[in-house]
Image (spheres, helix red, strand yellow):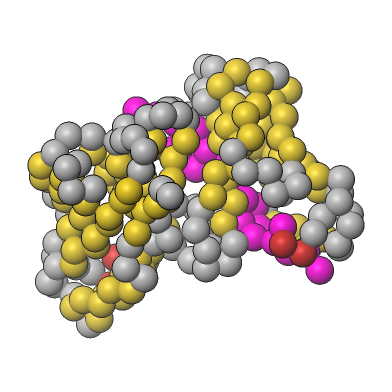
């Protein structure tokens, strides 16, 4: 079956970094997105990648390896307010309008 | 700038009662629109999508239906709510590869 997998929890320390991993197994691939979601709120778009490699967007960077079905979101210079859930979503190209979300990784940033 | 608004923000409803949730997008012509559902602590699940007025495709029905009566409006409804319908409902539109979500509607079914 098709799926997007993420670790449930991640802890890191303020001022350091955190890497949120995502692996996927889908019948097709038409891009991968990352979102931040706070408790009781809607997800907020962070990054979209469709080509292999590292995309540096400052506080957030995104890596993609299509051959390995793997992506990560790297948060640098962590702040307490970065504590949130981070969702990985894969757009399947067999149906360009279908997106599969991972369950999300809850990042807890410690002081 | 595009804005997407959902209503109501929250609802508490009885099992077996009807439901209607709405979504309006402004500043975007002919948007692709989506309904998502998220159980508490659960995964975002795509329910419906629509690429044009009057046309709605079902991904997972969950005893719900959707309609697109206007270019800028998307409606989610059911005639009889189940306990399992509780959760967070999100309307979204697509930009270049990403989804933009409305504020969401929190539904509690008792």
Q: How many marks are shown on the rendered structure?
A: 0
- Kindly tell me whether residue A72 is visible in this rendering: yes
Picture residue at 30% right of the left edge, 41% below the top: A32
Residue B26 occupies quadrant: top right
Residue B14 occupies quadrant: bottom right
- Does A32 lie within the magenta span? no
With respect to residue A39, does B55 lie above or below? above
Horizontal placement of A60 versus B31: left or right?
left
- The range drawn in magenta is B85-110
* Residue B73 in picture, x, y percent from top left: 66, 28
With respect to residue A80, does A50 lie above or below? above
* Residue B6 in picture, x, y percent from top left: 63, 42
With respect to residue A30, does A102 lie above or below? below
With respect to residue B26, does B108 lie above or below? below
- Does B87 lie within the magenta span? yes
Picture residue at 40% right of the left edge, 52% below the top: A3
- The secondary structure that dominates the magenta segment is strand
């Amino acid at each position: 079956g098709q799926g997007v997998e993420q670790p449930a929890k991640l802890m890191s320390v303020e001022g350091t970094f955190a890497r949120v991993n995502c692996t996927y197994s889908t019948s097709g691939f038409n891009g991968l997105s990352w979102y931040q979601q706070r408790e009781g709120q809607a997800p907020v778009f962070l990054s979209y990648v469709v080509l292999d490699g590292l995309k540096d967007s400052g506080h957030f960077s995104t890596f993609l390896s299509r051959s390995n079905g793997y992506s990560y979101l790297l948060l640098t210079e962590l702040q307490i307010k970065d504590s949130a859930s981070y969702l990985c979503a894969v757009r399947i190209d067999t149906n360009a309008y279908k997106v599969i979300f991972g369950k999300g990784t809850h990042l807890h940033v410690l002081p | 700038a595009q804005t997407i608004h959902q209503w109501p923000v929250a609802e508490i409803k009885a099992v077996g009662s009807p439901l209607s949730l709405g979504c309006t997008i402004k500043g975007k012509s002919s948007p692709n629109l989506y309904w998502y559902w998220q159980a508490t602590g659960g995964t975002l699940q795509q329910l419906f999508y629509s690429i044009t007025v009057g046309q709605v495709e079902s991904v997972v029905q969950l005893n719900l239906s959707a309609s697109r009566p206007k270019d800028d409006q998307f409606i989610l409804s059911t005639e009889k709510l189940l306990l399992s319908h509780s959760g967070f409902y999100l309307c979204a539109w697509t930009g270049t590869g990403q989804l933009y979500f409305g504020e969401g509607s929190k539904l509690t079914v008792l």
